[in-house]
Amino acid sequence: MLAALRHRMHETFVRWALRVRPPEPAPIILTQRRVYVLPTRAGLAYATALGVILLGAMNYNLSLGHALVFLLAGLGVVTILHTFRNLALLEIRPGRCEPVFVGDVARFALVLKSQRPDARTSLRLFVNADAPLEVDVGPQASTLATLGVAATKRGWLPMPRATIETTWPLGLVRAWSYAVPDFNCLVYPAPAATAPPLPWGGEAARGATRDGRGADDFSGLRKHQVADAPRHVAWKAVARQQDGPLLTKLFSGASAEQIWLDWNTLPDAIASEQRLAILARWMLDADAAGLAWGLRLPALQLAPDNGPEQLAAGLRALALYQDGKG
Amino acid sequence: MARANRPVSGRQAWWLLATALAASAPLAQQVPLWLSLAATSAFAWRAALTWRQWHLPPRWLLVLLVMAGTVGVFLQYRTIMGRTPGIALLVVFLALKLLELRAARDAVATALLCYFLVLGQFLFTQTIATALLAGLTVLITTAALLAASDDRPQPWQQLRRAALMLAQAMPFMLLLFVLFPRVQGPLWGLPQDRFSAVSGLSDTMAPGTIAQLSQSDAIAFRVRFQGAVPAQSQLYWRGPVMPAFDGRSWRVAQTRGAYPAVPYAGSGTPVDYEVTLEPHGKFWLFALEMPATLPADSALTIDYQPIARQAVRNRLRYTQSAWPAAIAGEKESPAVLRAALALPEAGNPRTRAVGATWRAQHGDDGAAILAAAESLFNQQLLIYTLNPPLLGADMVDEFLFDTKRGFCEHFAAAFVFSLRSAGVPARVVAGYQGGEVNPVDGYLEVRQYDAHAWAEAWVAGRGWVRIDPTAISAPSRINSNLAAAIPAGEGLPFLARAAWLKDLRYRLDAVTNGWNQWVLGYNPQRQRDLLASLGMSAPDWRSMTAMLSVLCGAVMLGLTAWILRNRLRVDPALAAWRRFTRRLAKRGIAWQSWEGPLAFAERAAAQAPLHAAGIREIAMLYAGLRYGPAPQGSDLERLRRRIAAFKP
């Protein structure tokens, strides 16, 4: 009950504290208005100790005791400013986030940029307070901070609210701020652990090769492209020429090594998420086998091909599949 | 928080050990030897733990050690309350805290313990050296806290940052020190042992009590005269008056505080002065004879001795004035006179006999008997010495007629005894005589070795008359000082004799006095005086708090400005580019922030073909500055000129 109330109050505060309706466009600058400062538990102990020392100094008329308390109080104020300064005006931009499968950890790489001429020390970033990430940002430099978030659902995973805080330099006060960058990670459906074998033949025969870039009979050479499978590099041809470009062998035909991964070939009894999982498994297997594969979803079709681009496109289609729309 | 649970690293442990050492070493004299040794071995253990990366001692052992330490302190002092036991306990806790440094948050606990120990140090001494040492301790503690947050920087870097932060804290300290409304302590009862080791006059005088003081060159009090400093022979600082004699020692009268104001008429020019009295733990105040006014919160005893309402346990400042030629006690009450005549039943027969002769010769003529006594002291050729021989039961007789060597208490006691035996009321007055003017700050410094005892006799028509029997035999004691009166070769405080150190001593004393007056003696009264002299009308806690808030706010603003001094600085090339795109936007060619400069230039050139060349050049320059390999300042200048000249 109490915990729930606290949680709700915290959420209300965060909504107010963010000031911008999330997600925010990049770059997010932690302006002074959105950096908050409160004493830590150690800071409260420090303040209490100062109070006790002041009482003692008053009681015993210790002038130097007064001076000690006042110096330490000044130090407390100064440390508030230093802690605040450590965080204020930090710039946060979303970096890269590689797609992951459900069940993996999505890694959101944030670029922290500081325009200050001195370093920012011991900044802590976290989505979940149990696993903070500690980074420094050098003077007028950027640092990459990668926050892991468990991917539980396929589709776009928006980056959750990140808290960024620091208690540097004395650990007596904590300055913190929140950021919800406009930053999404693509989550592929988890490939099924057990799946029917790859659908050879049948449907596959219908898929005619339109461009002749199959994997069956050798039909010629062309300039190597990054996405071409290394196995198809014409090493002998390359070796014959001096300093020439890499060449890729082209094959024609390929009816036998070209398959269609079709949503509709799966039995009706299989639910759609399970279908997606099976299709994902097939894609991975087909890719590993070097097959050219095509994908048919109820409202989407991907021409047969192979290579990382094809795999990424296929998995993306599965990740973003929506029942009825595809 | 996850961070607070992080284990303490080796570097952090070294820092905390240094902090603990700095905080507890100055207290080594105050705590018992066994505790010093125990703490030292705990520190050594800590060092070994860090050095060898041993495991921390188990918790049960630590609990056992804490209990042993507490019991040890209790057995030592029979209490754990009070000043010294409290500090001893803090040392125990600090030493054992170091042995259980598990998490980073233990660093804060250690630092706080150290702050308390620094305060504890101030209970014993508040000299300039103590303050400097405490400042050093706070510096190390701050560096240790910094290390607890981030232990990567080198020690000198941590110290530098700590010094920077403390320097930034200084303005706050000064403002708070001057303006924080002061409260006169104590707020509650002080432990009994607060003022144990203070030297000074006591309320009894036996042979040797004042001679003991002559070995101390500690300051008893300092005086600032409004006008010229009176002659040395007039500087009799009246302290405890001792009419009661038991055959060996003299003591003060039991009754106290009879007069709320001075009961005798003044005469002559009053001497105005201000005394800064060092704490001596007794009630009496010292006043130049005879007191003309009384300080606040004090009264005059029936024998004209000013006493404070509370024992002087803190350095006390009061203003007073004196009538050097006042006639006091012209109509003295019979009870006081009776007390000033009382003698023990027996003892000192020879002196009694002399007194009886005087009585027979001069009858009730007190002045004549006084003259006779003075001439007796003159004839006896008494020697003033710090090392008088030991005296037996008839000490007055032995001093006057046999050994003839004594210190001021012998002189005063013998003189008063002889007068009483002749029927003249007389009493011993203890106090200080003389003092030295410090040429640096003009204060008269009265030291413990200026302690003195003299006699006071009551003569009809003249009231109480001061006679200094020491002056009869050793006039130089009164006219110059102790060092001049004591034969060479007798032990004296080093500083009382060494002339070549005098100048240095004067300077040091002036600094110490300034420290005492303005730092240690900055009490509610002085605070009000200072603020009034700075132009604050009727300073009270409200106006002080208001002024404090305003000034602290100003300092905060200054520091905040420093903090945000580097706001987001826009790249100068980008700023110039924005000027350029704003100008084009007016022509309806808006730059989109996602658009690269060259692509934008092409689009703009197509829309404004007249300016195509200019637009392309600017875009090229800008792209070179922002994304080129080695941007040059001259390019920036060129970009600015081109943009300034660009008029679409």
Image (spheres, coloured by chain):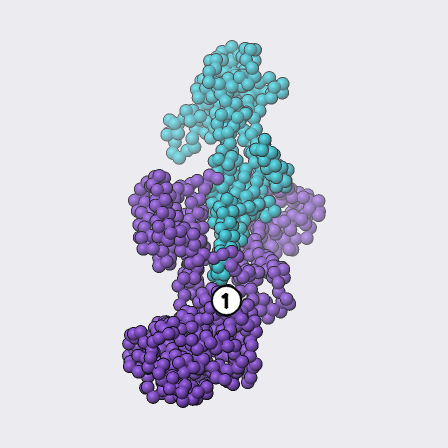
Chain colours: A cyan, B purple
Q: Is residue B576 left or right of residue B171?
A: right
B183 or B475: nearer the eye?
B475
Residue at horizontal 42 percent and vertical 45 percent from the top: B106
- The chain that hosts pointer 1 is B
Is B335 drawn above or below residue B357 in the view shown? above
Question: Can I make out residue A265 in this image?
Answer: no
Quarter in which the C terminus of chain A is drawn: top right
Q: Is residue B629 left or right of residue B13?
A: right
Question: Can I make out residue B546 in this image?
Answer: yes
B291 or A80: nearer the eye?
B291
Residue B443: give x, y in percent of width and height. Answer: 47, 76
Task: Classify 10 Å Cα crowding around label 1: few (below 14), some (14-19), many (20 and above).
Answer: many
Residue B633: give x, y in percent of width and height. Answer: 53, 55
Residue B616: give x, y in percent of width and height. Answer: 61, 47
Give the residue pinned by disc 1.
B521
Quarter in which the N terminus of chain A is drawn: top right
Residue at horizontal 38 percent and vertical 34 percent from the top: A242
B83 or A125: nearer the eye?
B83
A303 or B522: nearer the eye?
B522
Type of residue at label 1?
Gly
Residue at horizontal 46 percent and vertical 68 percent from the top: B254
Number of numbered markers: 1
Residue at horizontal 35 percent and vertical 83 percent from the top: B353
Q: Callout 1: helix, strand or loop?
A: loop
Residue A218: give x, y in percent of width and height. Answer: 44, 20
